[in-house]
Structures are given as structure tokens and as C-alpha cells.
């Protein structure tokens, strides 16, 4: 195989971005679209001159489809992923990989059994400052990690929640934590390691029309003895920032709005950190759900390489499930008013 031919399943907000990214990279192209609404599937297919479907089985029977990009509402990720795996198609699935842990585990098993690749979109792992932070940890510039904070302090208005699946337990699987904060929660976990316990409070404070939390606060203890905090919200007008702050015994790194906001190492300045420092971009307000596609493109390049070489992508199902595990534990802790041990 020299080119991975993708079907984009779910032609809404993020499906359109996936199609654009797939078509723009070497070794990949869009050959089909799928949406329950025929007009949406046809409209996106017309941009790429490809086939379109409203029925998943029909799409999966298309011999011109090697892989499926799952861009459906979050509660529908499992069903299509498992169908696709059984049809021998590789899967790249949007975050959260599903909203239930047993469903996510079933996705991993189905893809491993069918020997197809499963990649979970966590595009911020591919951001340059995150790569630099990982290098700093590898090189010992941070020393032992002491604590880390993931804060997603955003705002979503009533128009955003008028999309009927958002803010529902059945299709969104949660609120500000499961939908928005998951990106920076995933970064915190990928930097700090496995979580030992979680203690949390979640509330719906600013959007009475939604079922799920719009403020979630959690304290974590990691298995390596470090501590962590998570703050996630969609009530903070007008929308401020997503931030990852990591404190080691020899250094501090703060990434805000996907840019390097601050760094300081006892070892002194590092040229690559100095070059990446961009406090101006880091301190912009986050006023819109629109996202730019550079990191999705990097993650697609990684996934296409994995498919073409028969290796695992960087963010496998086993990696993608970690943030889901912690967010489910946060919900359990809030519901049961006790610390949850993972
Ligand atoms: N990585 C990111 O930064 C990012 C950003 C936004 C959304 N997302 C994720 O992408 C997913 C989709 O979010 P969105 O904002 O694009 O939603 P959306 O509502 O804009 O799009 C979802 C699409 O799925 C279609 N659909 C619904 N049920 C279907 C079914 N059974 N079969 C086929 N099509 C169906 C809808 O008609 C719609 O076109 C969610 O899981 C969300 O968490 C990720």
C-alpha cells in the first residue's frame, strides 16, 4: 500500500477539518464520506469528488476505503470503530475515544484482534512546546517531577449547546472535562505518568440547560508520588486559556494556549526553549471553538506512517484510554463524595 484511503465518518465541525488535513498530506486521500444526514455527506464528498454514504455498512463495503476517521458524536465512537475493525479497516478516532471505559476497552480489543491500527486524536501531544517539555524531562533538565496542573478555562455560549448532543450524558458523556479539558488532561497524564487517586467536585453552574458539568475541579496523586490538579470549565467568560504547568525540582515549564508561556531551568537557558518562547500568543484570550489544523496534520502524518509501515501510532487506544479513565474517576469521586483509587 502506498496511499491510505480514508472515509470521513461524521461530516460536521471536526469531520470537515479531518477531510482537509487528510487530503493535504502525502500518502493519504479522502475517498468517502458518511453522515446520517445525506446533505452533509454529499456536500463534503463534493469537495473531494468522492463517494458518500448514509449507511455505515455500505461505506465499510467500499473497496476504496482502507481507514475510517471517526468524527461522530462521542457516544457513537465505539460502534463504528468495532464495525470498521471487523471489516478490516484501520481507525483514527476523535477524542474522547468513547464515553464509557468498557466501550473503549472493546475498541482496543477489536482493533488488535483484527490487526488494524487504532489511533486516538490527541493532537496537542504533537504541539512543539509539548515535544520540548518531553525533551527537557528526558534530558534531566526538570529533575524529579513534583506537581503539575491542567487548567482549561473556557467559555461556551448557549448557541454552542444548542447542538443537541452536546452537554448530554448519552452522546457527550460528560461536559467541560470530557469534551473540552480532555486535551490538557491527556497532556498532564502523558507528562506526569499514571494516576493513583482522584478527589473531585463537578457542578453545572452556568448552563442550566445541559445535563453535564460545566465546572470540574480535581486533585490527583500520581503513582510516582507527584501531585496534580485539574480545573476545567466552560463558564469563564469570555474564554481565557488552556494551560499545562509542570513543576520539577530543577525547573518549571508553562504551556498556555498551545504556546510556550514560560520556562526556567536551574541548568540555565536552552536555545530551543528560548526560540519557542511566545508569551504574547500564549496570553491571547480563547474566544472561539475554532481550532487550527497544524497538530491534527502532524498526528495524521504519524498515523499514516503507522498504517504504511505496520507499526503502532504514537497515540494508540491504550494511550487514548488514559484520560477517559481519569475523567470517569473524577465523575465517580464527585458523585460518591470520596477519593477514588485507580
Ligand atoms: N480534536 C478536537 O480538537 C475536536 C474538536 C471538536 C470536536 N471533536 C470531537 O469530534 C467529535 C464530533 O464533534 P463535532 O463538533 O464535529 O460534532 P458535529 O455535531 O459538528 O458533527 C457530528 C456529525 O456526525 C453526524 N452524525 C450523528 N450521528 C450519526 C450517525 N449515527 N451516523 C453518521 N453520522 C452521524 C451529524 O449529522 C454531524 O454531521 C466529538 O467526539 C468531539 O469530541 C474534537
Image (tube, grey):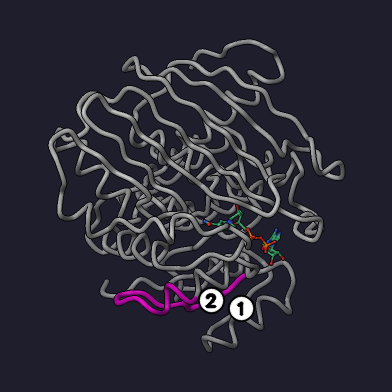
| Left or right for 151, reference 144 | right
Is 24 within the magenta? Answer: yes
| Left or right for 246, reference 138 | right
Q: Quadrant of the N terminus?
A: bottom left
Residue 27 image position (x, y, % from top left): 30, 75
Disc 2 to disc 1: CB gap under 8 Å: yes
Residue segment shown in magenta: 20-34
Give the residue displayed 24% in from the left and 24% down from the top. 249
Give the residue displayed 36% in from the left and 59% down from the top. 299
Q: Secondary structure at mark 1?
A: strand
Is 124 within the magenta? Answer: no
User: Residue 52: which numbered mark, if any?
Assistant: 1
Residue 30 image position (x, y, % from top left): 46, 77
**Relative to 291, residue 252 above or below:** above
| Left or right for 335, reference 136 | right
**Relative to 32, residue 308 above or below:** above
Foreground pick, 148 / 330: 148
Give the residue displayed 42% in from the left and 42% down from the top. 317
Mark 2 to mark 1 CA distance (whole Å): 5 Å
Instruction: Determine which residue is flagged by label 2.
Output: 32
**Which mark is first along the chain, 1 or 2?**
2
Tell me if mark 1 has few (under 14), some (14-19) or many (20+) residues whose alpha carbon lies within 10 angstroms of its own.
many
Foreground pick, 163 / 188: 188
Residue 138 image position (x, y, % from top left): 17, 37
Picture quadrant of residue 191: top left
Ligand 1 lies in quarter: bottom right
Foreground pick, 303 / 141: 141
Amino acid at each position: 500500500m502506498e496511499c491510505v484511503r480514508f472515509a470521513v465518518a461524521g461530516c460536521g465541525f471536526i469531520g470537515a477539518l479531518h477531510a482537509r488535513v487528510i487530503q493535504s498530506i502525502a500518502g493519504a486521500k479522502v475517498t468517502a464520506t458518511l453522515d446520517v444526514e445525506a446533505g452533509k455527506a454529499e456536500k463534503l464528498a463534493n469537495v473531494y469528488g468522492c463517494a458518500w454514504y448514509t449507511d455505515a455498512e455500505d461505506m465499510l463495503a467500499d473497496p476504496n476505503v482502507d481507514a475510517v476517521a471517526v468524527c461522530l458524536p462521542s457516544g457513537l465512537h465505539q460502534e463504528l470503530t468495532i464495525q470498521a475493525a471487523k471489516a478490516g479497516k484501520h481507525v483514527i478516532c476523535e477524542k474522547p475515544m468513547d464515553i464509557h471505559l468498557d466501550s473503549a476497552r472493546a475498541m482496543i480489543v477489536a482493533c488488535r484482534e483484527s490487526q488494524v491500527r487504532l489511533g486516538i486524536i490527541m493532537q496537542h501531544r504533537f504541539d512543539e512546546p509539548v515535544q520540548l517539555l518531553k525533551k527537557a524531562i528526558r534530558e534531566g533538565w526538570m529533575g524529579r517531577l513534583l506537581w503539575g496542573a491542567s487548567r482549561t478555562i473556557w467559555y461556551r455560549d448557549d448557541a454552542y449547546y444548542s447542538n443537541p448532543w452536546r452537554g448530554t450524558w448519552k452522546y457527550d458523556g460528560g461536559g467541560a472535562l470530557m469534551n473540552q479539558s480532555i486535551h490538557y488532561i491527556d497532556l498532564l497524564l502523558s507528562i506526569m505518568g499514571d494516576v493513583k487517586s482522584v478527589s473531585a467536585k463537578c457542578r453545572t453552574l452556568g448552563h442550566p440547560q445541559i445535563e453535564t458539568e460545566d465546572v470540574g475541579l480535581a486533585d490527583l496523586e500520581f503513582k510516582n508520588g507527584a501531585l496534580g490538579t485539574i480545573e476545567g470549565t466552560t463558564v469563564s467568560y469570555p474564554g481565557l486559556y488552556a494551560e499545562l504547568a509542570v513543576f520539577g525540582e530543577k525547573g518549571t515549564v508553562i504551556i498556555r494556549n498551545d504556546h510556550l508561556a514560560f520556562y526556567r531551568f536551574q541548568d540555565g537557558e536552552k536555545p530551543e526553549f528560548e526560540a519557542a518562547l511566545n508569551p504574547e500568543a500564549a496570553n491571547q484570550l480563547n474566544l472561539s471553538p475554532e481550532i487550527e489544523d497544524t497538530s491534527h496534520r502532524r498526528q495524521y502524518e504519524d498515523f499514516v506512517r503507522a498504517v504504511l509501515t505496520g507499526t503502532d501510532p504514537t497515540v494508540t487506544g491504550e494511550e487514548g484510554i488514559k484520560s477517559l479513565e481519569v475523567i470517569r474517576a473524577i465523575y465517580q469521586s464527585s458523585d460518591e463524595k470520596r477519593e477514588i483509587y485507580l
